Amino acid sequence: MYEVDRSSAEFREYLDLYERADLLDLGRRADAIRWELHPEPVVTHIVDRNINYTNVCVADCGFCAFYRRPKDHEGYVLSYEEIGEKIEECRAVGGVQILLQGGHNPYIPFEWYLELMRYIKAHHAIHIHGFSPSEVVFFSERFRLPIPEVVRQLREAGLDSIPGGGGEILVDEVRDRVAKKKAQTEEWLGVQEEAHRQGMRTSVTMMYGMGESTADRIEHLLKIRDLQERTGGFTAFICWPLQPEGTPMFDGAAKTDAVTYLRTLAMGRIICRNIPNMQSSWVTMGHKVGQVALRFGANDYGSLMMEENVVSAAGTTYRATLEEMERVISDAGFTPRRRRQDYSLIEEPAFA
């Protein structure tokens, strides 16, 4: 259903462009598409908070330094009240969204998740961007419910949109090597398509640098482009390199460089021109590269990252205040504007 023909002229053209094009020429091509789609000199960003409701996980992904196995003394599950406190701290600084993600925790019943959505909606006015496709697949398998039913129940309980976490590289040979127990390509894309069918908007990601080929990366981009062509449900694309420090499978591996990041982002903008927004991944690359990314196809500066646990567990520590983020955007020659998850602009700071 989500096949890509690697022998096609289109595939070979994109692969050659990715591997051989002059870096600045590639950036100019991506930047031109960015201005076609977003003719105003505006770069958006969002104030939100990542809340990892549990770190207990049985997926055993070799690239993750955050998770803990069941019964590990460092494992946790946050209470509804603890999650509520984090939400209110986010709202107090103008936050309009939470990103709610956790591990594949076999001890949490499905009703806990549904009741969490209802609790948040009853007590805290905020957009819930939560449960990656891999988590949805885990729920389906663990609770023996079809994917459409899992999505329907989460949506009816209060889930507003689904993040693109766990995308990594959407090629099964790669996923089988680095995350064998997690959703494979058809399953991951299937959750996204079902969410779109039910009227939910989602984001889509790519984490690269796990030993995959450049052809694997092009296949990933073509798969998400083709799904977007059918559904139109993706709001944004975000890519970033593996953070190898401290991860079990890649400990000691070298992180890919800034040039690779800029080339990959530019290819995302060139191939996926039907996905309206591209984020600059300053959290993994730092503000200097983050600014350059705004000339390589990105029109959004992502999140304030009021709280971030997964990437930082692997040693990445880039942080910023809202004022710093907006200054960085301004220094790059753009007008910073706050947004919501659907990329609609916020006219005034959304303080509670």
Image: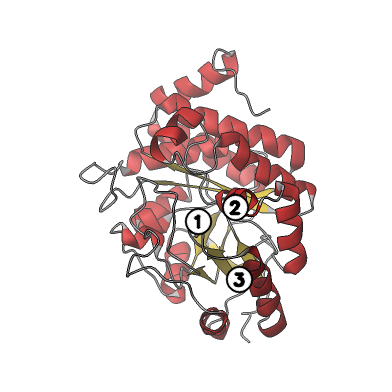
Q: Is residue 215 visible?
A: yes
Q: Position of residue 146 (x, y in %)?
A: 72, 47
Left or right: 352 in relation to 209: right
Residue drawn at (28%, 59%), measured in percent from left and top?
Answer: 315
Disc 1 secondary structure class: loop
71 or 167, which is in the foreground? 71
Look at the image and tell me in which quarter the N terminus lies: top right
Q: Position of residue 283 (x, y in %)?
A: 40, 59
Amino acid type of the residue tagged 3 in the rendering: Gln
Q: Name which of mark 1 and mark 3 comes first in the sequence.
A: 3
Q: Which mark is residue 142?
A: 2
Look at the image and tell me in which quarter the C terminus lies: bottom right
Left or right: 12 in relation to 251: right
Left or right: 57 in relation to 346: left
From this view, report whether residue 331 is shown above or below residue 215: below
268 or 209, which is in the foreground? 209
Q: Which residue is mark 1?
A: 104
Disc 2 secondary structure class: helix
Q: Position of residue 42 (x, y in %)?
A: 59, 59
